[in-house]
Image: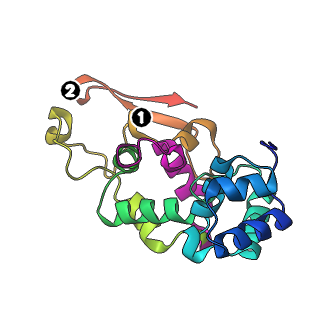
Amino acid sequence: MGRGRPLELMEREMIALGIKKRMSYREIGDSIGRDHSVVFREIERNGGRENYWALRAQRWADQLRKRPKDRKILASPKLAGAVEDGLREKWSPMQIARRLRRDHPEDDSWWVSHETIYQTLFIQAKGTLRSEVREGLRRGRVQRRPRSRASQIGSKIKNMVLISERPQEAEDRAVPGFWEGDLIIGKDHASGDRDPG
């Protein structure tokens, strides 16, 4: 079986034909020399059996290949929709990631880390994910999480994000706009040292 190489348009046309003939994933896979799991993922990430269209799937794959860092969410309209739904429910990226893994324990095509959600929102939101996604990120903190003692005390810094809660982009400077240093607040708000990045 040919595994590991990208599907080509001719293979996608054969997948579409197999769907039309009501063939199983395994039968389609055998007809193109691919494992049935490759066929399953290809169909599911491109709208399912009812909405699969070979040319659209090929264009989508070509677009993703041009990006230097493909994002798993962008490779799957269903996954992108699930992330959007979670953000509309005011869930944090971490809650969304945990929920997807819990709801789909046997299908890792649904598994995504909260870091990947953050990266997708920061880097790819323009024109790809709708405004609800960007708005969801701006909410910042999980609203249903019990408040810790520190958050009940409050902070003098408006919209402060703890170092432990900042996205990976702040660490590797992947997104323009992150400062080169962090303000560190000590115990009982005693210090205000700056940690140079």
In which quadrant is the C terminus drawn?
A: top right
Among the two numbered marks 1 and 2 on one chain, the one whose residue lies closer to the N terminus: 1
What is the span of residues highlighted in magenta in the rendered image?
101-127
Residue matched to label 2: 188
Number of marks in the image?
Answer: 2
Q: Position of residue 28 (x, y in %)?
A: 70, 59
Please name whichever residue, 58 or 142, is drawn nearer the observer in this view of the structure.
Answer: 58
Q: Amino acid at mark 2?
A: Asp
Nearer the observer, disc 1 or disc 2?
Answer: 1
Does residue 58 lie above or below 114 as drawn? Answer: below
Q: Position of residue 67 (x, y in %)?
A: 76, 56
Mark 2 secondary-structure assignment: helix
Please name whichever residue, 84 or 17, is drawn nearer the observer in this view of the structure.
Answer: 17
Q: Position of residue 119 (x, y in %)?
A: 56, 50
Query: In the image, what residue occupies the spot 44% across and 59% down?
Result: 83
Query: In the image, what residue occupies the spot 49% across and 50% down?
Result: 110
In which quadrant is the N terminus drawn?
A: top right
Residue matched to label 1: 163
The part of the image, by quadrant, that contains residue 174 is top right
Q: Amino acid at mark 1?
A: Ile
Q: Position of residue 147 (x, y in %)?
A: 16, 41
